[in-house]
């Protein structure tokens, strides 16, 4: 259930909050000028085109490539080693996001605040991207993956602020729509590319060779990484030609230590409902990512009558993606008309039901339908979860708290990879999927303790001071 980029698409709506962090952050008027960026459909589409190769890469890697490479090097020990590589990668991503955002907010580069981060992050990322594909040991694979996480998040963290930096507020919805379009195209393309190129016979048919299965899979991974590297460089070139930032005056910049201190001085006790929502999201995402990261291994073990593992994983993931789109739009339209808690109850119920059905079926056709059901639940949860969070944000501090809210998306990846890898190694991957409804039930129960905005106001409490 490669729904990683579902969060990327939905995060568009809070990206516009990330152009500054803390009360000393630079305002939009200080970094945006009508002479710098001319609004047009073409410009709005090209300003976000970098999300196409970024999502293409992550969709392919998290769906299949990482799991295939880990199994290639470790065999039956794949669960334990998947836990190790996933934990290190997620920790690296979280740390670099915490640093790169505030650092870019206070960068005084003459080409703009985000320019050096996007340029060097993408350029440097091509090196570990290729070493990842050419790795000849698990250790080399892990080191490459950690550096990919570091460099790509070093670039995309600050890049998320480009839209609010340059696009006037009245056009940011259109720009966000283009970003959602590129990420959706990237996700679908990544799922199809990884599914086809890792399927037996595809690479041999394309190259006219007769490589044994292990070598054919390694060649498929190399082709995938080369396509992603070229796509990143081409789209980087397009972005750098289109994006013309106004530099930050040196007098407006804060020292990094001050920016970091103010950005992460959270004071969650002052905002108990937001804090409870943050914790519930953390637990629910543990359930979601258990399904995402271990789908390929589940297909191998639980669907013995299926065909090629890579192709079947692709079909289920595409079904989940389609379901996610349906769930997102349906829940988004309901979020302003009914209780958000109720929608989250229903959406998590859908996902939990799908997880249970995964655990009891051995039919590949049933698994595809179940994947669609899972996607509906997760898509609906993401849409309403975001809306719930924005309603509970302390006014005037949205940037800081939405950035923290995103941590409840990244850190669970490390935890569930560790837990799921150990459980899968000892008890099998169908058992791993049995943990999904457990996480969802706990997280959903925690939602019952969160008051909605109108309830807080009715109780006479302030959302924030």
Image (spheres, rainbow, N blue to C red):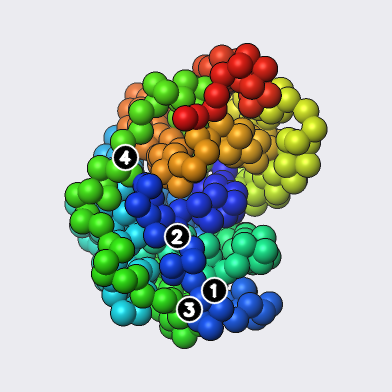
Quadrant hosting residue 388: top right
Kindly state the secondary structure of the residue where label 1 is placed.
Answer: loop
Q: Are marks 3 and 2 in contact (CB under 8 Å)?
A: no
Residue position for label 1: 47
Q: Are marks 2 and 1 in contact (CB under 8 Å)?
A: no
Using the numbered discs, state the Cα–Cα distance from disc 4 to disc 1 in whole angstroms: 29 Å
Q: Along the polypeptide, which appears first: circle 3 or circle 1? A: 1
Which one is closest to the eye, mark 2 or mark 4?
Answer: 2
Percent coordinates x, y for residue 247 in the rendering? 36, 75
Q: Residue at x 54, y 49 (%)?
A: 14
Q: Is residue 303 above or below residue 154?
A: above
Mark 1, other Cα within 10 Å: few <14 / some 14–19 / many ≥20: many
Q: Which mark is residue 27?
A: 2
Mark 2, other Cα within 10 Å: few <14 / some 14–19 / many ≥20: some
Using the numbered discs, state the Cα–Cα distance from disc 2 to disc 1 in whole angstroms: 20 Å
Residue position for label 3: 243
Q: Along the polypeptide, which appears first: circle 4 or circle 1? A: 1
Comparing 310 with 401, the one in front is: 401
Comparing 219 with 256, the one in front is: 256
Q: Along the polypeptide, which appears first: circle 3 or circle 2? A: 2
Using the numbered discs, state the Cα–Cα distance from disc 2 to disc 4 in whole angstroms: 19 Å
Kindly tell me whether residue 360 is visible in this rendering: no
Q: Are marks 4 and 1 in contact (CB under 8 Å)?
A: no
Q: Along the polypeptide, which appears first: circle 2 or circle 4? A: 2
Percent coordinates x, y for residue 165 in the rendering? 48, 66
> Could you tell me how many numbered marks the image carries?
4
Which one is closest to the eye, mark 2 or mark 1?
Answer: 2
Residue position for label 4: 264
Q: Residue at x 56, y 78 (%)?
A: 34
Which one is closest to the eye, mark 4 or mark 1?
Answer: 4
Q: Along the polypeptide, which appears first: circle 2 or circle 1? A: 2
Mark 4, other Cα within 10 Å: few <14 / some 14–19 / many ≥20: some
């Amino acid at each position: 259930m490669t729904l990683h980029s579902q969060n990327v698409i939905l995060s568009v709506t809070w990206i516009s909050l990330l152009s500054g962090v803390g009360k000393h952050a630079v305002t939009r008027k200080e970094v945006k000028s009508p002479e710098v960026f001319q609004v047009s459909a073409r410009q709005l589409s090209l300003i976000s085109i970098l999300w196409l190769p970024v999502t293409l890469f992550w969709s392919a890697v998290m769906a299949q490539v990482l799991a295939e490479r880990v199994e290639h090097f470790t065999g039956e020990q794949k669960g334990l080693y998947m836990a190790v590589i996933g934990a290190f990668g997620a920790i690296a991503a979280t740390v670099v996001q915490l640093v790169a955002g505030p650092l870019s907010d206070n960068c005084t580069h003459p080409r703009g605040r985000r320019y050096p981060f996007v340029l060097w992050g993408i350029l440097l990322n091509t090196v570990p991207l290729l070493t990842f594909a050419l790795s000849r040991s698990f250790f080399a694979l892990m080191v490459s993956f950690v550096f990919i996480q570091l460099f790509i998040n070093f670039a995309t963290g600050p890049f998320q602020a480009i839209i609010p930096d340059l696009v006037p507020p009245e056009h940011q919805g259109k720009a966000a729509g283009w970003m959602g379009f590129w990420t959706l195209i990237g996700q679908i393309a990544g799922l199809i590319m990884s599914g086809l190129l890792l399927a037996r016979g595809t690479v041999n048919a394309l190259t006219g060779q007769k490589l044994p299965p292990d070598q054919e899979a390694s060649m498929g991974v190399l082709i995938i990484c080369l396509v992603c590297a070229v796509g990143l460089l081409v789209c980087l070139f397009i972005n750098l030609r289109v994006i013309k930032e106004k530099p930050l005056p040196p007098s407006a910049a804060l020292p990094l230590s001050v920016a970091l201190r103010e950005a992460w001085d959270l004071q969650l006790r002052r905002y108990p409902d937001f804090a409870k929502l943050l914790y519930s999201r953390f637990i629910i995402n543990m359930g979601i990512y258990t399904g995402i990261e271990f789908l390929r291994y589940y297909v191998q073990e639980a669907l013995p009558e299926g065909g090629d593992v890579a192709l079947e994983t692709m079909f289920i993931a595409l079904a989940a993606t389609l379901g996610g789109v349906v769930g997102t739009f349906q829940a988004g339209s309901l979020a302003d008309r009914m209780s958000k808690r109720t929608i989250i109850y229903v959406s998590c119920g859908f996902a939990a039901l799908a997880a249970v059905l995964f655990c009891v079926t051995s039919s590949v056709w049933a698994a595809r339908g179940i994947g669609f059901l899972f996607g509906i639940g997760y898509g609906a949860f993401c849409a309403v979860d975001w809306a719930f969070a924005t309603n509970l944000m302390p006014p005037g501090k949205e940037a800081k708290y939405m950035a923290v809210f995103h941590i409840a998306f990244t850190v669970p990846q490390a935890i569930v990879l560790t837990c799921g890898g150990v459980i899968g190694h000892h008890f099998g991957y169908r058992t791993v999927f049995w943990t999904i409804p457990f996480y969802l039930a706990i997280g959903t129960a925690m939602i019952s303790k969160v008051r909605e905005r109108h309830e807080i106001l009715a109780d006479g409490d302030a959302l924030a001071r």
